[in-house]
Image (cartoon, helix red, strand yellow):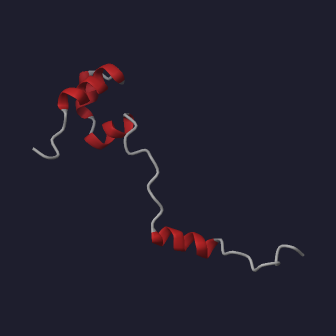
Amino acid sequence: MTGALDWAGLMRAGLHGLRLTPDQFWRLTPAELALMLGQGAQARPLGRAALDDLMTAYPDAAKGALDE
């Protein structure tokens, strides 16, 4: 089955690794648990729209403009 969660592994990580109580573990959403385990915390690649925004906000200076 694709996309199935490894409940045994998640419970081991939550109850033993994070030292959550069973009640705390079962109240978490999968997204909250993933965040607590450090998953999804890495930066995403810069997309074209974000690059365009940065280029607009911080345009290159004309050659020699900063030399004065």
Residue at the left extreme, as displayed: 1
* Above/below status of 66 relative to 16: below
Q: Quadrant of residue 20?
A: top left
Residue visible at 22% across and 31% down? 26
* Above/below status of 36 relative to 67: above
- Quadrant for the N terminus in the image: top left
On the image, the x and y values in percent for residue 29 come to: 26, 40
Q: Would residue 12 be found to the left or right of residue 45 on screen?
A: left
Residue visible at 65% across and 71% down? 58
On the image, the x and y values in percent for residue 35 come to: 37, 40
Residue visible at 38% across and 35% down? 36
Q: How many marks?
A: 0
On the image, the x and y values in percent for residue 56 come to: 60, 76
Q: Quadrant of residue 8?
A: top left
Q: Would residue 31 be found to the left or right of residue 49 on screen?
A: left
Residue visible at 50% across and 68% down? 50
Residue at the right extreme, as displayed: 68
On the image, the x and y values in percent for residue 38 come to: 40, 37
Q: Would residue 68 be found to the left or right of residue 31 on screen?
A: right
- Quadrant for the C terminus in the image: bottom right
Q: Quadrant of residue 63?
A: bottom right
Observer-nearest of 53 and 48: 48
Residue at the front extreme, as displayed: 63
